[in-house]
Image: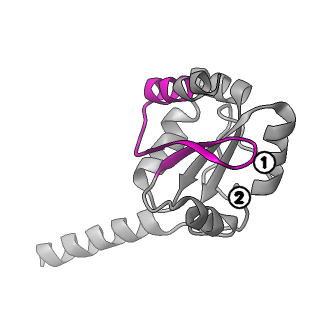
Amino acid sequence: MRKIVTAILLLLATCSMMCVSCTNGVNSSDEVVTGGIDFFKGTWDEALAKASKENKMVFLDAYASWCGPCKKMKRNVFTDTAVAAFFNNNFVNVAADMEVGEGVMLADKFGIDSYPTLLFTNGDGMQLVRESGYQDPEELVELAKTVLNNKK
């Protein structure tokens, strides 16, 4: 009996981790991030236009709603004050669920099939740098600095 109860509890825990309400659009994150990276609210084309106008690159957080490392980055990395300051000053930041709305098109366009995928593009949407997997705050800022240095 104890094994059955344990199995049911494990199943319920797994289901609750995967159960997230979804919305459409580029920035359809299930977790609200405050005081961190300011993710652009609009379409992909609008983000590209903003990046071109401001002479910035685009940082795309390509995630899936069920992805544990993605949620950990939202909670622990994107809210880091040093990360937020650096990214908000240097990039147009976009977060998109690759399984919902415009994210499906972006996943197809960039061949994204693992999460999180951290993608940097120019204002024309051309991929410049791509990294997959969890990055701690220091690793993410170093990656972004490398992207900026290679632009020059």
Disc 1 versus disc 2: nearer the observer: 1
Whole-number angstrom distance, CA of label 1 to CA of label 2: 10 Å
- Horizontally, residue 6 falls left or right of residue 60, namely left
Q: Residue at x 13, y 73 (%)?
A: 2
Residue 91 place in picture, x, y as percent: 70, 33
Residue sitting at the far right: 53
| Helix, strand or loop under label 2 | loop
Is residue 134 magenta-colored? yes
Is residue 30 magenta-colored? no
Q: Earlier in the sequence, mark 1 or mark 2?
A: 2
| Helix, strand or loop under label 1 | helix
Q: Please identify the quarter of the rendering in which residue 25 is found.
A: bottom right
| Residue 47, label in figure | 1
> Above or below — where is 140 with respect to 26?
above
Q: Please identify the quarter of the rendering in which residue 123 is found.
A: top right
**CB-based contact (under 8 Å), mark 1 and mark 2:** yes
